[in-house]
Amino acid sequence: GVTLKDLNQSLAKYRLALPNLGSISAQTVGGAMATATHGTGLNYGVLSTIIQEITLVTGLGEVIKISKDENYQLFNAAKCHLGSLGLVTELKLQVTKEFDLEVREQPETLETVLDKLPERLQADHYRFWYLPHADRVWEWSATRKPPGKTAPKQNFFQRFQSWYREKLIGYYTFELLLYLATYNQRLIPLVNRWYVQQMFSKSKQSRGNSVSQFNFDCLFKQQVNEWAIPIEHTAEAILQIRQMIKEKDYQVHLPIEVRFVKGDDIWLSPCQGRDSCYIGVITYMPYGKYVDCQSYFDDYEKIMAKLDGRPHWAKRFGPDADKLEKMSPHWNDFQKVRSQLDPDNIFGNSYSDRVLVKPKKTPLYYS
């Protein structure tokens, strides 16, 4: 399918852009919309909120259009459908004129960030990364600007400096050190502190088109678990996660990413009915080597669940349909639409079976 990267390039030809993006654009447009993928900025919802019309082939073989004007009763189910309502063949999206982002990044303490969070959230787009074991924060704040002049090309020395910092240190050396730490996890705090000193110690500013500023290199293969909680629980959640890491003596990779998204009315959106804070934890797989993070992720999920959290559908999470039903106020509404559009479960798979189909309880018999 068409990827977000493809769409970004096509829109740029007409001086248009998506109003918001996440950290990468490698996903298909259909997959990003089906799972309510998000960026950051309290004036902007998950990507699914820009859907204006959906053309869908149902499990009954019918081709239907769903929008505010047609089959509206299906609209809030179909905008985050998890691939379980049918085959999407067309999407009409609300895009915007192209724009630049003026970005400021800086190191800060967690206490300062949390104390000044309401002020920080006035920015067009704001996120921060908590950096475990270094106990620091890296802030990212962006202001939308009209398109400006393209940045001048870097000379050879500037290109070398950029390669040295971003690739040799920030990627290749970091991956090697994380790989060595798989043999002795006590090295992880040292690696984290070294990386923070190298990459997150000096403030910087930049300006560029929206895609280049929203997206960044997410490095190598990784396991990510991300949940959305009501925004008023942000400080409580991040402080509890920090305390959990300390008390359990977990040696964890950086960063813990914190982003903010406007509430919506999409039935299975993690932001349904509330402005939300997304908090994501990460464990890298250097050179593809699996690193066990189950206990860390389990304890993280317990904290998020107690704070009325809901998982990101496209990332790793533990709850099955039994637990997910309790987290989603419109769960039963969605299931009715699913039964209507795909009564024979034509579009069912192992993922939808886990997250949408409640296991049948075996009756107990006594003799």
Image (spheres, rainbow, N blue to C red):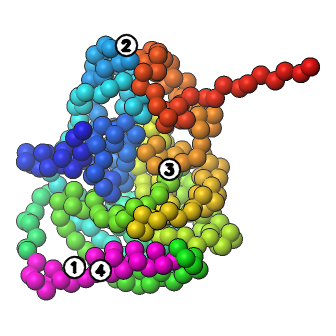
Which stretch did the figure color magenta?
154-181
Q: Amino acid at mark 2?
A: Leu
Pick whichever of labels 1 and 2 is earlier in the sequence: 2
Q: Amino acid at mark 1?
A: Ser
Q: Amino acid at mark 4?
A: Leu
Magenta stretch holds residue 167:
yes
Contact, mark 1 vs mark 2 (Cβ under 8 Å): no
| Left or right of 304 on screen, residue 157 | left
Between 119 and 334, the one lying in front of the other is: 334
Contact, mark 4 vs mark 3 (Cβ under 8 Å): no
Pick whichever of labels 2 and 3 is earlier in the sequence: 2
Which quarter of the rendering shows the C terminus? top right
**Residue 159 versus residue 331 in the image, above or below:** below
Magenta stretch holds residue 220:
no
Circle 1 residues within 10 Å: few <14, some 14–19, many ≥20: few
According to the picture, the residue beneath numbered tag 2 turns out to be 60
